[in-house]
Amino acid sequence: MAPTTHTVTNQAPPLVGYDVYTTDRALTEAVEQHVDPGLIDGVRDELAELGRTAGSAQAQEWGAQANENPPKLRTHDRYGNRVDEVDFHPAWHRLLGKAVSAGLTNAWGRPAGHVRRAAGFLVWTQVEAGNGCPVSMTHASVPALRTDPALAAEWEPRLTSQVYEEGLRPASAKAGALFGMGMTEKQGGSDVRANTTRAEPLAADGEYVLTGHKWFCSAPMSDGFLVLAQAPGGLTCFLVPRVLEDETRNVFRIQRLKDKLGNRSNASSEVEFEGTWARRVGEEGRGVRTILEMVAATRVDCAVGSAALMRQAVAQAIHHCAYRSAFGGVLIDKPLMRNVLADLALESEAATALALRLAAAYDADTEEERAFLRLAVPAAKYWVTKRCTPTVAEALECLGGNGYVEESGLPRLLRESPLNSIWEGSGNVQALDVLRALQREPLALNAFLQEVGKARGADHRLDGAIKDLLTELADLDGIEARARRLVERMALVLQGSLLVRWAPSEVSDAFCASRLGRDWGTAFGTLPHTLDLASIVERARAVV
């Protein structure tokens, strides 16, 4: 007789076998908004192919395997030789290989390159966020290397290649290369000017040897690294190849891998340099200036990555509630649950719209857009990454106890969610960077206000928020202590402007009523009940 006590009913099927890109209406519409009509068919096909792969059972299994089998450090080989290698599960290499082949390290030299790359990064991060670190570092290294035309000519084709080759060999012998980064040290953290790593010049122009340590070195299996060190002329940027051209290993001693809260498939390390050969990038004493554009690019990726985590969490929550019944009906039809889901969907769409707008500014590359990015990047990085953890946590709760179980995938998203707020400068660093730009770069504020002003007159709550923001900007008394409040308002006004211009009216109405009109509580699910919440939820649903 068949057992009857374990009949499975009223469970949502897994969200698998779907197109992560095409079913994300906020993302697809943002891409359509920012890509030239003559390119859009090819870009759409490219992203849909990646979206189908991301939603496949195979890719989702790769993500789970890479997370469950974190990298392992091998300092020595069996004979006692120092090797300093990091071993990864095969699933990690498959994820990273797909990211590279999809062009996620190739934005700087192709039409609409930043928008299509940001959209792809948002899609692929939903499979497993850990492989995004080397992808982001490699992508962001290009503008730093361009300060030295000879280095850029040598390395840029390798970094933008869509061929992934694992293993440590001279970069010249590989069809594609990856970059990591080593900036922070024990004593300094975000204050990189406190770095103590020394750089001593060699006889050949631009060549140095480094001695010192890095407290956080990203992606230690990479082919090269951008690092900061104190040269005779001051803090300077250097390129450290992992393997030298004569096939010998550069001195790159990995002391240990970090045991992290999340991002466990990715290796973060502590490294020591002792007579490590390096090439100078840019001028001596101008290391911070050399890496500024690299830092900005990685900050954009922090916002895009957080938007990805939010999108996947919200998609999972809505999918679950579309199938799960309780208290006499399907959860998605329950007014209170619908309010929660709509609120989460608003947060996700606003993050996506802002992230893609930053990418579009990079593609435009005009003086006005560069000025806009100077304020918009740290403001977006601050706010979108801050909103990630509460969004993912609320989405997890929508699944109840099922969401708290590892098999749902939501705990992995939750552990990942705080990271982007910490990487590339935590919240206070971003807020202070906004103040610095306001005080030193008046063109940045003009560009920002012109951007948000494009929606002026379309919604009275947005107009009121812009007026309040201008009042706050005019009051510099105690501005540092108010920096977080100011940057939050800047980000919300910018998101509101984008949604009023480009999102459906039910989305922009709900966003402006809650985030700008302040008809909202302090938890998700407190939207005004008179709004068209059902349409907002349906728009965010990932239909299999």
Image: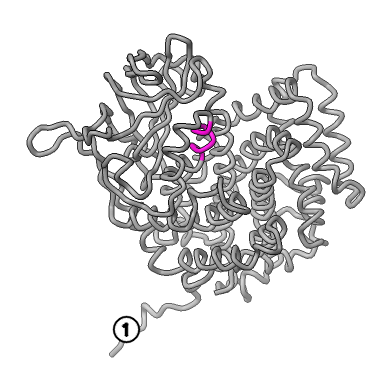
Mark 1: amino acid: Pro
Q: Residues within 10 Å of mark 1 (few under 14, many from 20)?
A: few
Q: Which residue is mark 1?
A: 3
Is residue 379 within the magenta segment? no
Point out the stretch of residues depicted in magenta. Answer: 140-146
Q: Nearer the viewer, residue 84 or 226?
A: 226
Residue drawn at 44 percent across, 22 percent down: 228
Q: How is the image coloured?
A: one colour
User: Residue 93 in the image: x percent, y percent?
Assistant: 33, 54
Q: Quadrant of residue 373?
A: top right
Residue drawn at 64 percent across, 69 percent down: 332
Q: Nearer the viewer, residue 187 or 245?
A: 245
Q: Is residue 394 visible?
A: no
User: Residue 401 in the image: x percent, y percent?
Assistant: 47, 59
Is residue 143 within the magenta segment? yes
Q: How many marks?
A: 1
